[in-house]
Amino acid sequence: LMEMDLIIGPLFRKNFKLVSNYAKLFDIKIVNPLTIRDEVLDYEYVFKIKPSQTTQLDLVDQLVKSDYPDAKILIVRHNQFRYGEMTDMLRNMLERGMHEKIQIANSLLDNIIKDYSLLDTTLARGEMLENLIVEDVMVYREFLELQMEDSTSFQNRVDEIVYTEEGIEGVLKKASIIRPTVVIAISDKKVFALELLTRLNEVRDSLNITLIGFPNWYTFSAMETEYLQNLETHVLSDSYIDYDKPDIISFIKTYREHYYTEPMKYAYDGFDIGYYFLSALLKYGKNNERCIPYYELNLLQNKYYFRHKRNNGFENQHWNVLRYENYSTTKLN
């Protein structure tokens, strides 16, 4: 065993720690295929396949800034005891480079007041609302009519809502009625995800909302597809199998011929890990650690994008961004 060039596994933490210490003793590369825990990276030749949840933050930041640069951004987490540090990190990233204020034409605000007046069943026919709260600012119709050619300033910031304390009312209070709202939901609770998804769907006719759910929303089952689609929901996944790809079709066909059954997720993981690292050994030799961060290969379900973690091992940074549309998921570039 001490003459091995590469060890893949073991799968469980206690066993992996034991074998990685052995690998360290003899300068052997070792691959951890399943864990998301960073502590396995305490040896410089460890390659961690599953990216950590914190690496999702950069991707969410890029997604919002590229696709929704003018949106009102809300971060919703289930309770105050989970994901506080992640929320703070994401808010700081999103607010970096953000304009301090936005300008909205008074004529647009006046039209919004008129629209809400028509929807208000407590008003008599032809009666108008005198004021309306817009992004925590009280806007008066009389003032707008005197300054119709001007505009009104609003603070542009990322707001946080703790759902167990503020509920959907907290989300609606801070959502925008004058521009798109991006709701970033951070939770690993399926019950919370279903609740938020349902409640946001109830108000989608009056608010322009896009939902981003992470860290592991893609694993949640029984999510209403129509609701996900209505909110242009985005989720992140460390793997994605496109069954229309010729490579996937060929792999499934070959797998059936050899094993007389359907390939499960571990089969795709095993193929990708074996193909990637064995081809890297073939191409760059045993001492390939300097080349790995620049080595790109088309795999079945994922891409590997390794980065060296200071004096420790290498971690894959790649996440897939998936959007629900046409009653299916689409992978975004």
Image (cartoon, helix red, strand yellow):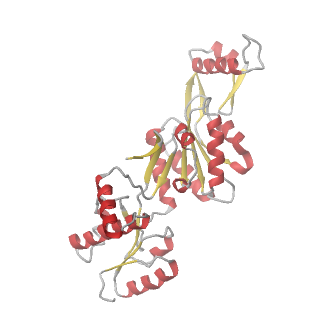
Question: Residue placed at 74% from the left, 49% from the top?
Answer: 165
Residue 137 rendering spot, x and y as whole percentages: 68, 30
> Furthest residue to the top?
126
Tell me if residue 160 can be seen. no
> Furthest residue to the left?
283
Question: Residue placed at 59% from the left, 41% from the top?
Answer: 157
- Vertical position of residue 246 compared to residue 145: above or below: below
Quarter location, residue 305: bottom left
Q: Nearer the viewer, residue 210 or 307?
A: 210
Residue 329 rendering spot, x and y as whole percentages: 45, 46
Q: Nearer the viewer, residue 302 or 67?
A: 302
Q: How many marks?
A: 0
Question: Residue placed at 27% from the left, 72% from the top?
Answer: 278
Q: Nearer the viewer, residue 27 or 164?
A: 164
- Vertical position of residue 56 compared to residue 177: above or below: below
Question: Residue placed at 69% from the left, 21% from the top?
Answer: 119
Question: Image quadrant for the N terminus?
Answer: bottom left
- Vertical position of residue 278 compared to residue 76: above or below: below
Residue 53 rendering spot, x and y as whole percentages: 51, 60
Q: Nearer the viewer, residue 254 or 289?
A: 254
Tell me if residue 10 can be seen. yes
